Structures are given as structure tokens and as C-alpha cells.
């Protein structure tokens, strides 16, 4: 972020999909929420409805938009910078499947043939944070696991690869606020089901 500490940032991951349950990399494929995922999304009403948000943004993908709607934010503004990481040739594959041809590969340190680099995802996340910097009040993002982890790591000044340490469960919320002159992780994985 370019100046100041900016607004309090709330990050909500979409509910479960068939691919999130199976561990398949789900970037741009628009896999819908499962029945479980819809129930998880609706469970976000309680932690979110007591908050006032100055800005609510959602990824354009259906699983994030549906989560926003079920959580009570049908009017969330679509933001393309909240799209999930483009996994390219690894779309739909699990890490163990990828490791059969690329031993030792992981999403945080490996290449993404035909997709985005982690630096490109971080550029999108940082650009979004910069645009929200002057918002007066809380900001809420509905999006996907890896983009939210990278966004949180960048917001905290840790660099995108630190997202590896910030696993976020389906239909859970993280909050980044302030303590003194620092961005601080206030809550993570609530109300994780």
C-alpha cells in the first residue's frame, strides 16, 4: 500500500465446491457451490451482519458471488482483481497429480505453465489494496483461497509467498486491522465450519 494504514479489511472465502473438497486447483473454472457450500455461505450472515461496510467487492466467479448473496450482500460490486490465481495448465489438478510430473512442486514456489506467476497475482492484490486505501470504513472482499491469502500477506507487508502460512477455510472470514502503526491480523478463519 502506498500511504497510511488504510481501512480495516475483511476477507471472506467462498463456500465449498466439489473441487475445493477434492483439492483440485480451481482458478478460473466456475465450479458452483455444493449444498454444503451454500449452507456455509449462509452461515456468514451472523458474523457479517453486525458490521457496517463502506465497500463490498466480490470476484466475478459464481461461487464468490453466490457466497456474497447468501451472506446478505447481493449488491456486492464485481471486481476482476479478486479473481482466483490463474493456474493455467494445472487447472483442475491436485498437488499430488502435479508432483507426479514435477517432483517437489507446490503452488507457492512452483511455476504455473500457461497461468499467472505469484508476482502477477500479488500485483493484482496490491493494486486492489491501493485503490481501497482511502475508503472511510470497513472493506469486505468475497473471493477465493489463494488470492485472499496473497492479498492478506501483501496487506501485512510480508510478501506474497507468506500466504503459504495463512490457510483460509471455505466460508470463513479474516480481518486485517491496525494496532498502533502496524497492519495487524485481528481474526482468521472465523466462523470456520
Image (cartoon, grey):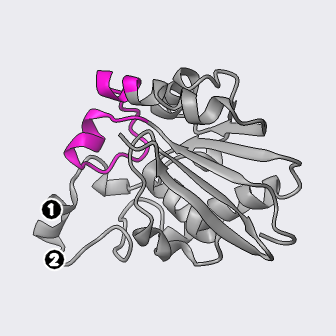
Q: Which of the two residues, 123 or 51, is positioned nearer the viewer here?
A: 51
Using the image, determine if residue 61 lies above or below residue 11: above
Magenta: main secondary structure = loop
Residue ID for mark 1: 96
Q: If you read the primary sequence from the N terminus, does the residue marked by circle 2 or circle 1 appear first?
A: 1
Neighbourhood count class around disc 1 (C-alpha, 10 Å): few under 14, some 14–19, many 20 upward? some
Q: Which of the two residues, 57 or 47, is positioned nearer the viewer here?
A: 47
Q: Residue furthest left?
A: 100
Which percent across, then down, holds residue 127? 73, 60
Q: Secondary structure at mark 2?
A: loop
- Residue 101 makes an appearance in the image: yes
Q: Secondary structure at mark 1?
A: helix
Q: CA distance from mark 2 to mark 1?
A: 9 Å
Residue at image location 58% in from the left, 63% down from the top: 152
Residue ID for mark 2: 103
Image: magenta residue range: 15-39
Which percent across, then down, holds residue 162? 48, 75
Q: Does the magenta segment cover residue 30?
A: yes
Left or right of 180: which side holds 152?
left
Amino acid at each position: 500500500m502506498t500511504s497510511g494504514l488504510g481501512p480495516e479489511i475483511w476477507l471472506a472465502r467462498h463456500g465449498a465446491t466439489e473441487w475445493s473438497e477434492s483439492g483440485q486447483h480451481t482458478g478460473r473454472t466456475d465450479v458452483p457451490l455444493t449444498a454444503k457450500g451454500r449452507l456455509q455461505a449462509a452461515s456468514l450472515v451472523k458474523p457479517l451482519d453486525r458490521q457496517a461496510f463502506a465497500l463490498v467487492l466480490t470476484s466475478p466467479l459464481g461461487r464468490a458471488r453466490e457466497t456474497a448473496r447468501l451472506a446478505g450482500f447481493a449488491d456486492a460490486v464485481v471486481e476482476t482483481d479478486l479473481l482466483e490465481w490463474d493456474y493455467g495448465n494445472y487447472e483442475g489438478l491436485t498437488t499430488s497429480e502435479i508432483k507426479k510430473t514435477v517432483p517437489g512442486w507446490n503452488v507457492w514456489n512452483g511455476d504455473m505453465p500457461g497461468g499467472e506467476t505469484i508476482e502477477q497475482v500479488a500485483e493484482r492484490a496490491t493494486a486492489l489494496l491501493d485503490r481501497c486505501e482511502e475508503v472511510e470504513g470497513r472493506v469486505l472482499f468475497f473471493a477465493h483461497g489463494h488470492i485472499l491469502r496473497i492479498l492478506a500477506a501483501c496487506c501485512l507487508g510480508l510478501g506474497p509467498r507468506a500466504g503459504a502460512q495463512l490457510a483460509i477455510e471455505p466460508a470463513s472470514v479474516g480481518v486485517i486491522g491496525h494496532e498502533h502503526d502496524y497492519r495487524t491480523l485481528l481474526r482468521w478463519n472465523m466462523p470456520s465450519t
